[in-house]
Image (cartoon, rainbow, N blue to C red):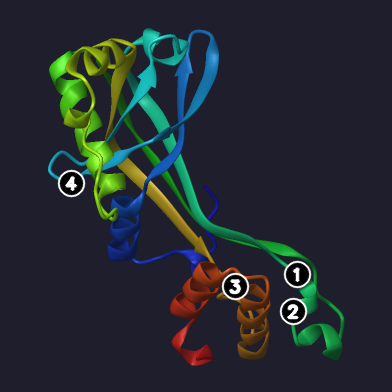
Amino acid sequence: MYIPKHFEPSDEAGQIFLRSINSGHLVSHTSAGLIATFIPVNFQEETNSIVGHLARGNQQWSYGTTEDALFISTSNDSYVSPSWYVSKQEHGKVVPTWDYMTAHVYGELVIHDDVCWLRQQVSALTNKFEATRAKPWKLDDAPEDYVAGQLRAIVGIELKVSRIEVSFKMSQNKTKADLDGVIAGLLKDGKTNISDKVSELRPLDKK
């Protein structure tokens, strides 16, 4: 992935972002060519792995373990209008762009066709997304025979992370005035979470 220096986060920030990943595109190279599937995932720090599952009917898993797979996750992305820049009024030399935070995670893709492994991972994934609810739903809330049937319909995947590339392109290369304009424009569009990230990542000399 092409990462200009001013969009390259620290190793610590990259690891924090890796731990925050909730979903993305799993891409693997097979004898049938490239195959990709969008899936929710969990990151396991103890094994440095991204785990999730695929439908049993999805051919991607059937090619088995591969040493070179890629997981792509993007968050806090938004169109940035040139009309938000103060410099538009000064010289007009501005163009649209897109801000985003993204990670390309590489590693060995391991297939898990084991009900016990799947139950543990599906339960952990569910608990992750239900954690903020007043009454979190748990896997045990569903009838056991129904859960057993659902588990038979999926196959587990584990990406053992070997390399990660992270890019935080959040207008850090803009002037202080243009950055202020981007933040104001995002807020006006109701994109508070993204404007907060632009504010958080803006260089110290532009605050």
In-image side of 105 versus 180 (left or right): left
Q: Amino acid at mark 2?
A: Trp
Q: Position of residue 66 (x, y in %)?
A: 34, 18
Residue that carries the numbered disc 1 in the rendered image: 81
**Marks 4 and 1, how far apart in space?**
38 Å
Quarter of the view holding residue 200: bottom left
Q: Amino acid at mark 3?
A: Ser
Q: Earlier in the sequence, mark 4 or mark 1?
A: 4
Give the foreground label among 3 and 2. 2
In front here: 165 or 176? 176
Give the foreground label among 1 and 3. 1
**Marks 3 and 2, how far apart in space?**
12 Å
Alpha-carbon neighbours of circle 2 within 10 Å: few (<14), some, or many (≥20)?
Answer: many
Q: Earlier in the sequence, mark 3 or mark 4?
A: 4
Residue that carries the numbered disc 3 in the rendered image: 171
**Marks 4 and 2, how far apart in space?**
40 Å
| SS under mark 1 | loop
| SS under mark 2 | helix
The numbered mark at residue 45 is 4
Quarter of the view holding residue 177: bottom right
Residue that carries the numbered disc 2 in the rendered image: 84
Quick check: 49 above or below 165?
Answer: above
In front here: 99 or 165? 99
Q: Amino acid at mark 4?
A: Glu
Examine the rendering and report whether any part of residue 116 can be seen. yes
Examine the rendering and report whether any part of residue 49 can be seen. no
Q: Residue at x 29, y 59 (%)?
A: 16
